[in-house]
Image (cartoon, rainbow, N blue to C red):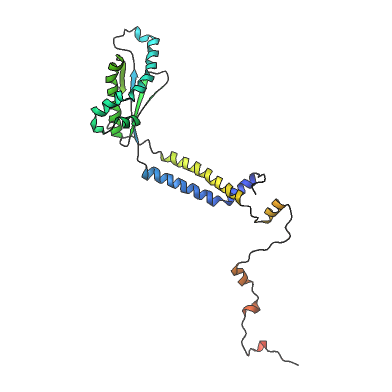
Amino acid sequence: MLSQELDLRDYFRIIRKRLWLIVGIVILACGIAGIYSVYIKNPVYEASTKIIVNQTPNQSAVAQLDLNQINTNIQLINTYKEIIKTPAILDIVASKYPQFDLTTDELMKKVNVSSVNNTQVMTLVVRDNSYSKAAEVVNAISLVFKQEIPDLFNVQNVSILNEAKVNPIQAPGPVEPNVMLNLAIAFVVSLMIGLGIAFLLEYMDDTLKTEADIEQVLGLPTLAMITRVGAEEMKAGEPVSATQTRKTGELEHVTAAK
């Protein structure tokens, strides 16, 4: 039936016909996504620090306005972003802070470094299942990075703008899982899958069920139609004489011969 060109009414008819299937798939998918997000997925917290790459302390006030030096510091940020995530920094963090119980590889997976274009500020972000631990780890990485950069580059142009608060007054909420986002994704994806299955089933169904189907496919009018009669309808349509019982001797059933 779908081999022919369909108009908008046909699409609505197919959707209405398989609506129970589409709704069932959407409800099932959203339910699974909600259960996974709330009860199965462990919450992930995020803590961050900001580091600025500025002028060296021994430069004069005139040199501080040098745009070339500022551009050089901005270019250094790309290098610093890679150095932070190398064993040159994270090995020291892992050995100096054994209470974290994290290896260098595990620290690499937890830390993320970003920067805004044309600024001298870097943002270090660490994610963990505990907010306090994430704050302690990101502060430790920032401090070790600041201490090790002078030995690596023979410069002192890194300063920590702000540290992550280990015990804030109001603890921030988890950044993962995002329940509403997961439900929205599950709804859209399941709706597309449900519609796809509905149209696929309609495409594979080549049976003729109504007079309109026969006229549409064969181009011939319907002369007669045999309806299905249920057991109750058959029982209700039986003649009264067939359902009545006659007893011997009843006068109404006696006839006299002439």
- Residue 11 seen by the camera: yes
For the image shown, how many numbered marks are present on the structure? Answer: 0
Q: Residue 153: give x, y in percent of width and height.
A: 31, 15
Asked where in the image residue 121 lies, by quadrant, the reply is: top left
Q: Is residue 235 above or below residue 166?
A: below
Residue drawn at x 64%, y 78% is 242
Residue drawn at x 56%, y 51% is 18
Judge from the rendering whether residue 118 lies leftward or rightward of residue 145; answer left or right. right
- Residue 164 seen by the camera: no
Q: Is residue 255 above or below residue 21?
A: below
Asked where in the image residue 115 lies, by quadrant, the reply is: top left
In this orientation, which residue lies closer to the viewer: 241 or 151? Answer: 151
Judge from the rendering whether residue 185 lies leftward or rightward of residue 12; answer left or right. left
Q: Residue 104: give x, y in percent of width and height.
A: 30, 29
Q: Is residue 135 above or below residue 13?
A: above
Image quarter where the C terminus lies is: bottom right
Q: Residue 94: give x, y in percent of width and height.
A: 26, 29
Residue drawn at x 40%, y 13% is 71
